[in-house]
Image (cartoon, rainbow, N blue to C red):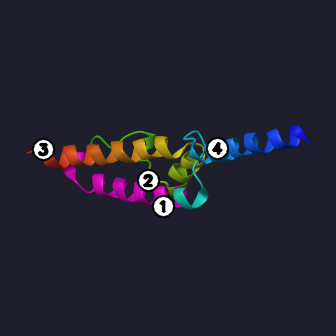
Amino acid sequence: MFARLMAFPAAAVLLAVWPASAAHAADKLYCDQYAKAAINQVRTALSNRKCADGVQGDRWSAEYHAHYDWCLENNYGTSGNERDARTAYIKACTAQQ
């Protein structure tokens, strides 16, 4: 009986902490939205002559599934950092005079 009583609080603590972990991979719906936004950022950067030359590497892939598949393998924080890096680049290169 005592073992059962002790198992419940331990399980409750585990369930309370588990969803808050940033180590979990992003879900499919989030990654769909992430990939669509990434493609929009790529198009925006490529359409501006001040930005186009710096659009290189995986971060700037024009392929939806490159972003979607990558997102599924990473957590929300990591994918958010990638999105923010693209945003910062676009802001910086469009601000150039």
Instruction: Please tell me how crowded label 2 is: few (under 14), some (14-19), or many (20+) other residues with Cα within 10 Å.
Output: some
The residue tagged with tag 1: helix, strand or loop? helix
Q: Earlier in the sequence, mark 1 or mark 4?
A: 4
Q: Quadrant of residue 8?
A: top right
Q: Are marks 3 and 1 in contact (CB under 8 Å)?
A: no
Location of residue 43 (image quadrant): bottom left
Out of 71 and 50, give the one closest to the viewer: 71
Looking at the picture, tell me which residue is in the foreground, 22 or 78.
22
Q: Nearer the viewer, mark 3 or mark 1?
A: 1
Label 3: which secondary element = loop
- Compare marks 2 and 1 and give the one earlier in the sequence: 1
Q: Main secondary structure of the magenta part?
A: helix
The amino acid type of the residue labelled 1 equals: Gln
Q: Residue under label 3, please give it.
A: 96
Q: Secondary structure at mark 4?
A: helix
The amino acid at mark 2 is Ala
Three-letter code, disc 4: Trp
Q: CA distance from mark 1 to mark 4?
A: 24 Å
Q: Which sits earlier in the primary sequence, circle 2 or circle 4? A: 4
Identify the mark at residue 33; answer none if there is no mark. 1
Q: Which residue is mark 4?
A: 18
- Residue closest to the eye, 17 or 96: 17
Q: Residue furthest front?
A: 2
Kindly identify which residue carries mark 2.
Answer: 62
Label annotation for residue 60: none
Question: In this picture, which residue range is highlighted in magenta?
Answer: 31-51
Q: Examine the rendering and report whether any part of residue 50 can be seen.
A: no
Count up the numbered dots.
4
